[in-house]
Image (cartoon, helix red, strand yellow):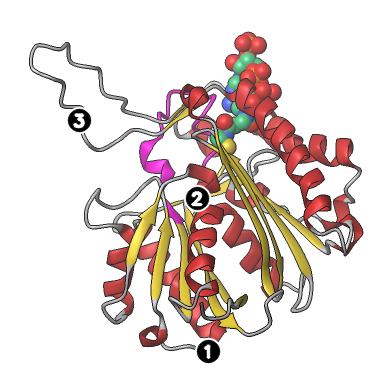
Amino acid sequence: MSQMLGVALRGTGSCLPARVVPNDEFTDALNLDTSDEWIRSRTGIRARRFASLGETSATLGSAAARTALESASLPATDIDLIVCATVTPDLMCPSTAALIQASLGCRHIPAFDVSAACSGFLYALSIASQFIRTGSAKHALVVGAEVLTRALDFTDRNSCILFGDGAGAVVLTGTPVLNAGVRTIRLYSDGTRQELIQVPSKVTPNPAPGAPLQPRLEFIRIVGREVFRFAVSRMIELIELAEVDCRELGLSGIDVLIPHQVNQRIIDAALESTGFPPEKVVVNLDRYGNTSAASVPIALDEALRTGRCKPGDTVLLVAFGGGLTWSSAIITL
Ligand SMILES: CC(C)(COP(=O)(O)OP(=O)(O)OC[C@H]1O[C@@H](n2cnc3c(N)ncnc32)[C@H](O)[C@@H]1OP(=O)(O)O)[C@@H](O)C(=O)NCCC(=O)NCCS
């Protein structure tokens, strides 16, 4: 068997739609029974971005991927694999990854989507890393891209204030240094709790002849309070497991924690329980809300571009969401 390779993070990129939607828009334009004060104090969100006409997961994902390729100094034709995490694909088929492959002008490489909601980016990262570790791909593009605001019920104050649109991407490259870059990834799911977060399908169920028609889900549905509890307990568990995973570094060896951006209170509760230092945590949910699979790569790209983390730092990425799913990764940049 040929030798296993390390997986270096070679570049990052992100793309946010230009349209900023502040909290006041829900009260002023949509007459929703909420307030800027409630949203800020209960979630930490001040604004989010909404995709405009013509902007889709594929267009935002392509733009994020182009920036990632620039930062990696790689032409699109060098990419050997594209994995795109999304629960809001432009179409069920072709995949969003295939649309990105065409838009970038890549060769005839494998390109496919992964559906794991807000954990999707780390699921995609895990798959791409394994292609690289085994030498099946030299350079891979991993994208998280979402337009969840297209599936919001703007009469449901429990859910519509939480989400935003955007995309983030990373370029991974094989390296002979085995422990460089992506060190560990953990992925989990629990489908028995599927009803806590649901995103509608574009496909109408086709029941067996004679079976009653199921009503089709039209909008995102969440059981917010339950998801909150789940998210806090899983985030605590994943931070504790990170200590096991990077035994030689210890938790103090983690320079930066990038959590899935859902709710400031979820992050605060997990930090309080684990004693992880808040000054090491990257938060941008105040500006972008929850962008699902795009949230972690957008925050990672911003953290690198603004100097919150730098090459050589070790980052812990933590995500949780629909499925239910939860996941973490430790990467040395
Ligand atoms: C949704 C969330 C912000 C609600 O915060 P919370 O503190 O748990 O609030 P609760 O659900 O307990 O609701 C408290 C009250 O606020 C009300 N409320 C909910 N949304 C509101 C809003 N936008 N504005 C004003 N009041 C609101 C509720 O109706 C409830 O009123 P009641 O007590 O009269 O029934 C929070 O639970 C959360 O962030 N959950 C996770 C979100 C999620 O699922 N994300 C997607 C997957 S990662």
Residue 265 seen? yes
Q: Is residue 305 left or right of residue 189?
A: right
Residue beneath label 1, please?
73
Residue beneath label 3, please?
204
The relative height of residue 189 versus residue 122 in the rendered view (above or below) is: above
Q: Identify the amino acid type marked 3.
A: Thr
Q: Is residue 110 left or right of residue 30?
A: left
The residue sitting at the front extreme is: 1
Q: Identify the amino acid type marked 1.
A: Ser
Ligand 1 contact, mark 1 (Cβ < 8 Å)? no
| Residue 152 highlighted magenta (yes or no) | yes
Residue beneath label 2, please?
120
Q: For the stretch drawn in magenta, what is the main secondary structure?
A: loop
| Residue 22 highlighted magenta (yes or no) | no
Q: Identify the amino acid type marked 2.
A: Gly
Q: Secondary structure at mark 2?
A: helix
The relative height of residue 107 versus residue 222 in the rendered view (above or below) is: below
